[in-house]
Amino acid sequence: MSYYVRLMRKEDIAQVTEIDREAFPIQWLPVNYEHELQSWLAHYIVACDDSEMGEESEVTVAPEKGTYRLASRVRQLFNYDHFLGSELPPSGRQYILGFAGFWIMADEAHITNFAVRKVHRRRGIGELLLISIIDLSTELNARNLTLEVRASNTVAQSLYYKYGFSQVGLRRGYYTDNKEDAVLMSTENTTSTSFQSRLNQLKKAHSQKYGIALYQIAR
Ligand SMILES: CC(C)(COP(=O)(O)OP(=O)(O)OC[C@H]1O[C@@H](n2cnc3c(N)ncnc32)[C@H](O)[C@@H]1OP(=O)(O)O)[C@@H](O)C(=O)NCCC(=O)NCCS
């Protein structure tokens, strides 16, 4: 399997909604994701595998850093899909394995959604998405990442702890479906030497385990 990460597009919403349905007790509708893609604050990525749907496989070349930076600024100014649509490969053949999103508010990135298809879990895709979120949010000038996670969701918490998040608070009865508490988690400054050096070690271990050569987000 060869997978990679790119920015989410409108055509991905059907598959993303499928993943959302199997991952979360409280679901978002396709229209919620449409709004997210139009929001200047929100940034969404998907992990894809061409080989699952494709008749012929394509090599995706990740853009140079500068190109991506320009693309992300352009995305904030215009509707991303319309502006860059002609440069993007068709996504009909791309099978989405997982997705993640965050909002940038001042210098903080708050993770809003994060899920991997059940049948593809425990293959490093969650880690790949989290690494990509950390890199992208840092590139967009965020200095720390925060999130809420169900108190019972020890699987996700263990992934977040692995990547340097720690518990910073508790919201009692936060989830409306079962009144479960939310654990608030946050990273230290993601640009600090200590955070970056730990991240590089984790990337190296992940890359060796799953054979991923490049941690860049394709357009
Ligand atoms: C949380 C989630 C995204 C992890 O995705 P994944 O692709 O299975 O994760 P990975 O294979 O990359 O695993 C990375 C780390 O996550 C943790 N983890 C993943 N599955 C685990 C499990 N079944 N038990 C314990 N820890 C687990 C481990 O720390 C693991 O690191 P390790 O391989 O060194 O043990 C996935 O379980 C999921 O989609 N859950 C439902 C949605 C959800 O809870 N989202 C988070 C909302 S805040």
Image (spheres, rainbow, N blue to C red):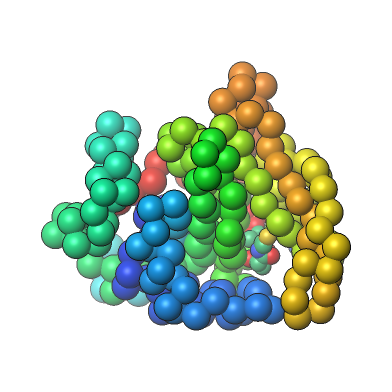
65 is higher (above) or lower (below) than 113 = above
Q: Nearer the viewer, residue 28 or 47?
A: 28
The structure residue drawn at horizontal position 81% and vertical position 79%, both measured from the top left corner, is: 178
Taking the image as shown, residue 82 lies to the left or right of residue 93, namely left
The structure residue drawn at horizontal position 71% and vertical position 42%, both measured from the top left corner, is: 186
Residue 216 location (% of width, % of height): 40, 41
Residue 171 location (% of width, % of height): 81, 58
Taking the image as shown, residue 62 lies to the left or right of residue 199, namely left
Quarter of the picture containing the N terminus is bottom left
142 is higher (above) or lower (below) than 92 = above
Q: Is residue 17 at all visible to an observer of this figure?
A: yes
The structure residue drawn at horizontal position 28% and vertical position 31%, both measured from the top left corner, is: 66
Quadrant housing residue 166: top right
Taking the image as shown, residue 137 lies to the left or right of residue 79, namely right
Taking the image as shown, residue 208 lies to the left or right of residue 64, namely right
Residue 73 location (% of width, % of height): 30, 42
Residue lying at the far left of the rendered structure: 86
Residue 152 location (% of width, % of height): 84, 65
69 is higher (above) or lower (below) than 58 = above
The structure residue drawn at horizontal position 44% and vertical position 79%, both measured from the top left corner, is: 30
Residue lying at the far front of the rendered structure: 106
Assign ligand 1 to one image quadrant: bottom right
Q: Nearer the viewer, residue 187 or 162?
A: 187
